[in-house]
Image (cartoon, rainbow, N blue to C red):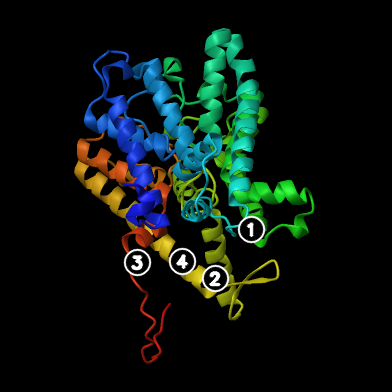
Amino acid sequence: MSVRKAGFSSSQIIILGFAGMIIFGAILLMLPVSTNDGKGAGLVEALFTATSASCVTGLVVKDTFTYWSVFGRCVILALIQIGGMGVVTMAIATFLISGRKISLKQRSTMQESISAHNLGGIVKLTGFIIKMTLIFEAAGAAALSVVFCREMGLPRGIAFGVFHSVSAFCNAGFDLMGEKGEFSSLTHYSAEPVVNITVMALIIIGGIGFMTWEDIRNRKTDFKRYRMQSKVIIFTTAILIFLPALYFFFFEFSSLPYGERLASSFFQSVTLRTAGFNTADLTRISETGRGIMIIMMLIGGSPGSTAGGIKTTTFAVLVSTAVSVFGKREHTHFFGRRINDSVVRNAATILTLYLAMFLAGGFIMSRTEGLPLLDCMFEAASAAGTVGLSMGITPGLGTSSRLILTALMYLGRVGGLTLIFAAFSGKKGNTARFPEEKMTVG
């Protein structure tokens, strides 16, 4: 029986699609051919890795290069690509290639999956997304291969270029640099401009959202004609990259040479957009720096993108709402446009959900593992925001803590509201209005 005939809602299809992909990926990773030792991964390791790849997070319990075989790494890469683009997007792409007709239900699901504003033209938009994804990833792979081939030779350099390009564009953070030091990520290339610029560009492009791409394509440099959401995304993303970069430049990387200091500061700020790569040793970051990183990781990328987190638009709506309250204005505004009150309520709900998941996960792991609370909060924020940055404690966590991170990665990728809408699909909202009474807050 098909999903459509079963009467599942769009939210339920997205939830089940990701769950099915994770389970299938975990089964493949448990096969003997998936690991270098020929024994296959254990259930928890396979489930954790499949979730991390499908939810484009990048947290790992086993080093990607040294533990997984070529087949295992190909499975991980496929999960990253499908997870980054979205299960529904890839399914629609398959239908387009095969020439099958796209039903209205499938179009509606696609609309919700990529946060499109209108149902009309959704199939054409899907084709545009797939085309641009391949172009960006190919360009990134070519640039990275130039550097990697100098060190590793042609075949391996190209393979590394492709893997890291897809991982960066999908904001996944998986890397193959284990041979340079376990869990080293891109620290070996902290002073390499091509690697830094290419990876940062891929992360930003993948994280600003597919609908923003469409605005840039249709309206080029005429920023005034962009949709209000695209304006908010671009402006907020720029602020969330520039301000943390200033902090890192003046307070965390002051001992580095100027060029490397500038590159490391911006790279570390960009990777907080849920990418998970790093060119610096995170264990040397101060507690203040870690606190800033936790906040940035929770905010994450933009809606309808390859990134996770509460999203830049959610953060912007909450800040703008606070500014409106301070200015004693009745409504929230952006660029001369009023925001509906339901959007403000959704933003507050999403923030509450993410804070509850992140705090609960961090507290439970700290108590269970006997580890410093800040380190556990960092890992929990990284999982909930689908970032993948780590203080290095994830590989040593027990089964219960790994399962907590697995749940956080899954919930962080599919989205809190999607999960709620899926759970309460088909139930009519209560439109009753109770008598009003004043209550003081603050």
Q: Residue at x 70, y 70 (%)?
A: 336
Residue type indicated by callout 4 = Asn
Which disc is residue 171 wearing? none
Left or right placement of residue 213 versus residue 372 in this view: right
Asked whether 88 or 367 is in front, the reply is: 88
Helix, strand or loop under label 3 = loop
As measured in the structure, the alpha-carbon distance from the residue carrying label 4 to the one carrying label 2 is: 15 Å
Upstream in the sequence, badge 1 or badge 2?
1
Task: Identify the residue position indicated by label 3 in the image.
Answer: 426
Which disc number belongs to residue 346?
4
Horizontal side of residue 288 vs 324, given as left or right: left
Which label sits in the foreground, 4 or 2?
A: 4
Which label's residue is closer to the chain start, 3 or 4?
4
User: How far apart in space, not on screen, are marks 1 and 2 (Cα)?
Assistant: 16 Å
Q: Which residue is mark 1?
A: 232
Q: Which label lies toward us, 3 or 1? A: 3
Query: Hey, what amino acid is under mark 1?
Result: Val
Q: Earlier in the sequence, mark 4 or mark 2?
A: 2
Viewer-nearest residue: 103 or 206: 103
Distance Cα–Cα, label 2 vs label 3: 34 Å
Would residue 243 be visible to someone looking at this image? Answer: no
The Cα–Cα distance between marks 4 and 1, rounded to whole angstroms, is: 17 Å
Kind of element beneath mark 4:
helix
Q: Is residue 291 above or below residue 85?
A: below
The disc placed on residue 322 is: 2
For the residues carrying marks 2 and 3, which lies nearer the camera in this image?
Answer: 3
Report whether 204 appears left or right of 283. right
Is 92 positioned to the left or the right of 118 in the image?
Answer: left
Q: CA distance from mark 3 to mark 1?
A: 32 Å
Name the spot of residue 21 as percent of width and height, x first: 36, 38
Among numbered discs 4 and 1, the one appearing first in the sequence: 1
Quarter of the image containing the C terminus? bottom left
